[in-house]
Image (cartoon, rainbow, N blue to C red):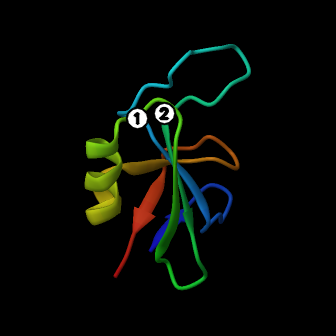
Amino acid sequence: MPYCRSCGNRRLFAASKVPPAAPTANGFASGLLGDFDTGGELVTITRLGADKVTARSAGGQPSDYFDTCLVCGSQDVEWSG
């Protein structure tokens, strides 16, 4: 289960190692976003430039990918369980 130590977010995270399709000043900093349920399970992956292979890999090993909080932007993300 992902947990942002800075703001307490447990739901919305991004993958810093996946660049966005088109970097912009106010756009997402990642091409791959993950939405987690209250039990910490990944329920939705949104691809914003990531290919299907990368998305499948992230779905299988989310702790290897989702390392940035989409609420506050922190990379102080802890994974447990």
Front residue of this view, candidates 61 and 47: 47
Would residue 60 appear left or right of 22 to someone viewing this image? left
Mark 1 Cα shell of 10 Å, populated few (<14), some (14-19), many (≥20) = some
Front residue of this view, candidates 38 and 20: 20
Residue visible at 74% across and 21% down?
Answer: 26
Residue visible at 65% across and 63% down?
Answer: 9
Say above or below: 53 vs 31: below
Most distant residue in the front direction: 52
Q: Which mark is residue 76?
A: none
- Indicate the quadrant containing the C terminus: top left, top right, bottom left or bottom right: bottom left
Q: Secondary structure at mark 2?
A: loop
Residue assigned mark 2: 31
Give coordinates of residue 24: x percent, y percent: 65, 14
Would residue 41 appear left or right of 6 to someone viewing this image? left
Give coordinates of residue 53: x percent, y percent: 26, 44
- Indicate the quadrant containing the N terminus: top left, top right, bottom left or bottom right: bottom left
Distance between the Cα atoms at labels 2 and 1?
5 Å
Looking at the image, do the residues carrying marks 2 and 1 touch, with CB atoms under 8 Å apart? yes
Say above or below: 8 vs 70: below
Would residue 72 appear left or right of 51 to someone viewing this image? right
Image quadrant assignment for residue 54: top left
> Mark 2: which amino acid?
Gly
Tell which circle, 2 or 1, labels the residue nearer the N-terminal end.
2
Residue assigned mark 1: 50
Give coordinates of residue 58: x percent, y percent: 32, 54
Front residue of this view, candidates 51 and 31: 51
Give coordinates of residue 73: x percent, y percent: 62, 40
> Mark 1: which amino acid?
Ala
Image quadrant assignment for residue 19: top left
Total labels: the figure holds 2
